[in-house]
Image: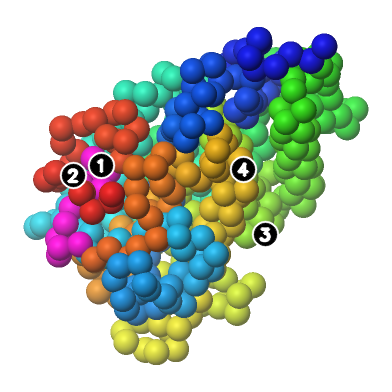
């Protein structure tokens, strides 16, 4: 007889195991303690909260980013229009600033400072040598406090292979330009750019040597990672109720489809001699972004981690976007000098990035969790460390916060904050909601009451 949640409980830390495989599972009804399930059925919020930070480079064309009206009655402008279907699930925050992204006596280097300061709120030491120093980033503060509750304390993703040395911006180390997550003042957390390696990190069992051996065997026999855990899945399925069996089938199908997409991308991998990208990365930048977003959604869905950062492109990036009709370099265009044609092209790039972010938000919202969706239990910051790329200003930053933070955030609004409100105040407020309260982060001055 199939067991029900009333008489049988599945441990939350349940994995499907096989050769080189440890597949975490999404939240099933059978995993919830009786009291928690009763609370959920009554409208309670016992589920874990997640936080992520998605970075886009070179600022934005703010006229096409900023809604004209404040409050709940506002229209999303051209750049943010792809998020319209989820407008009620997000906050557009105007007025946030990063004072420590400004020169403050250090001269040029705004792109490096923008990314280095984005999650730290600290002034980066101007150096192209080994003596880099900035500050601990908000994601790593959270990882230190609550990261022990998941298999991975945090997950760092990107599309540009991280650089940790060299001069990338007016005397600033490349470590500042290519990393937004910092475990310590001088310890960046380089993002993983290869979706295959991210997949293995999420679903491999982590035993030395076994992951590589299993991957070789899978490739040799063209088997899926799921085939090695199929017996475990069949045994588990027999123990689940109807709803959980359907959820398990849907989840395993999603994992298999994602693995197949990664495999196809790998078959068409390209190594660009003039662009520092690793083998195994999709030829298509759009597909690369979507794969990374899919993996992040799976990581949150399975509670493999609750904390992540994703740098969609490093600040100062001069990537071209011919697939949307923009063949000029992004960084070159950001120095538009008021030229309307260049500003329009910048807006198109901004809208492209927002479209990929909307894809991620749609994904989170499609995943049921408790009485709501996975997005309901998330706080996802999307934005840049620069305002207008032409002015290199670090005030009135383009920032969107998506997700309700477990019901603690009143979304569906455009909030215009007081000028020079530290971005770090937003981060303090998010840490509070993560159960990782912190007295101070970077140049923070207090919490943001406007979130609720």
Residue 222 appears anywhere in the view: yes
Determine whether the residue tagged by mark 2 lies in a helix, strand or loop.
loop
The residue to which callout 2 is attached is: 447
| Mark drawn on residue 442 | none
Q: Earlier in the sequence, mark 1 or mark 4?
A: 4
The residue to which callout 3 is attached is: 284
State the CA–CA distance, disc 2 to disc 3: 40 Å
Q: Position of residue 165 (x, y in %)?
A: 37, 42
State the CA–CA distance, disc 2 to disc 1: 5 Å
Q: Magenta residues, as a range?
A: 417-428
Q: Residue furthest bottom?
A: 340
Graded by Cα atoms within 10 Å as few (under 14), some (14 to 19) or many (20 or more), the crowding at tag 2 reads some
State the CA–CA distance, disc 4 to disc 3: 26 Å
Q: Position of residue 348 (x, y in %)?
A: 50, 76
Instruction: Decide whether residue 181 is among the magenta residues.
Output: no
Determine whether the residue tagged by mark 3 lies in a helix, strand or loop.
loop
Residue displayed at 37% across by 23% down: 146
Determine whether 312 is above or below 61 in the image: above
Residue displayed at 61% across by 37% down: 298
Q: Earlier in the sequence, mark 2 or mark 1?
A: 1
State the CA–CA distance, disc 1 to disc 3: 36 Å
| Mark drawn on residue 429 | 1
Q: Nearer the viewer, residue 19 or 5?
A: 5
The residue to which callout 4 is attached is: 367
Q: Earlier in the sequence, mark 1 or mark 3?
A: 3
Render colour scheme:
rainbow
Determine whether the residue tagged by mark 4 lies in a helix, strand or loop.
loop
């Amino acid at each position: 007889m199939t067991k029900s949640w009333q008489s049988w409980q599945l441990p939350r830390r349940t994995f499907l195991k096989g050769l080189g495989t440890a597949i975490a599972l999404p939240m099933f009804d059978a995993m919830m303690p009786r009291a928690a399930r009763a609370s959920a059925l009554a409208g309670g919020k016992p589920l874990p909260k997640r936080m992520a930070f998605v970075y886009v480079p070179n600022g934005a064309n703010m006229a096409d980013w900023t809604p004209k009206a404040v409050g709940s009655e506002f229209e999303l402008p051209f750049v943010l229009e792809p998020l319209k279907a989820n407008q009620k699930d997000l906050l557009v925050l105007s007025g946030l600033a990063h004072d420590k992204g400004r020169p403050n006596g250090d001269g040029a280097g705004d792109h490096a400072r923008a990314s280095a300061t984005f999650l730290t709120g600290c002034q980066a030491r101007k150096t192209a040598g080994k003596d880099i120093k900035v500050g601990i980033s908000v994601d790593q503060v959270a990882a230190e406090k609550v990261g022990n509750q998941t298999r991975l304390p945090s997950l760092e993703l990107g599309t540009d292979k991280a650089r940790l040395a060299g001069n990338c911006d007016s005397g600033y180390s490349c470590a500042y330009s290519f990393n937004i997550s910092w475990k310590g003042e001088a310890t960046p957390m380089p993002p993983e750019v290869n979706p295959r390696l991210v997949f293995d990190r999420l679903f491999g069992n982590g035993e030395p040597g076994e992951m590589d051996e299993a991957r070789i065997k899978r490739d040799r026999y063209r088997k899926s990672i799921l085939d090695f855990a199929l017996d475990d899945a069949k045994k588990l399925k027999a123990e689940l109720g109807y709803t959980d069996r359907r959820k398990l089938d849907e989840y395993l199908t999603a994992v298999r489809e994602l693995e197949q997409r990664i495999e196809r991308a790998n078959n068409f991998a390209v190594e660009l001699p003039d662009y520092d990208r690793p083998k195994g990365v999709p030829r298509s930048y759009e597909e690369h972004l979507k794969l990374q977003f899919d993996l992040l959604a799976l990581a949150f869905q399975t509670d493999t981690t609750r904390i992540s950062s994703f740098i969609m492109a490093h600040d100062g990036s001069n990537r071209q976007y011919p697939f949307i009709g923009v063949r000029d370099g992004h960084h070159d265009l950001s120095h538009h000098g008021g030229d309307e044609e260049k500003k329009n092209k910048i807006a198109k790039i901004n809208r492209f990035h927002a479209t990929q972010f909307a894809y991620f938000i749609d994904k989170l919202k499609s995943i049921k969790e408790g009485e709501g969706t996975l997005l309901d239990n998330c706080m996802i910051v999307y934005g840049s460390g620069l305002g207008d790329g032409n002015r290199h200003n670090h005030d009135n930053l383009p920032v969107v916060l998506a997700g309700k933070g477990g019901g603690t955030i009143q979304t569906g609004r455009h909030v215009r904050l007081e000028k020079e409100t530290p971005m770090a105040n937003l981060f303090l407020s998010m840490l509070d909601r993560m159960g990782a309260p912190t007295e101070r982060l970077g140049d923070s001055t207090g919490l943001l009451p406007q979130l609720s």
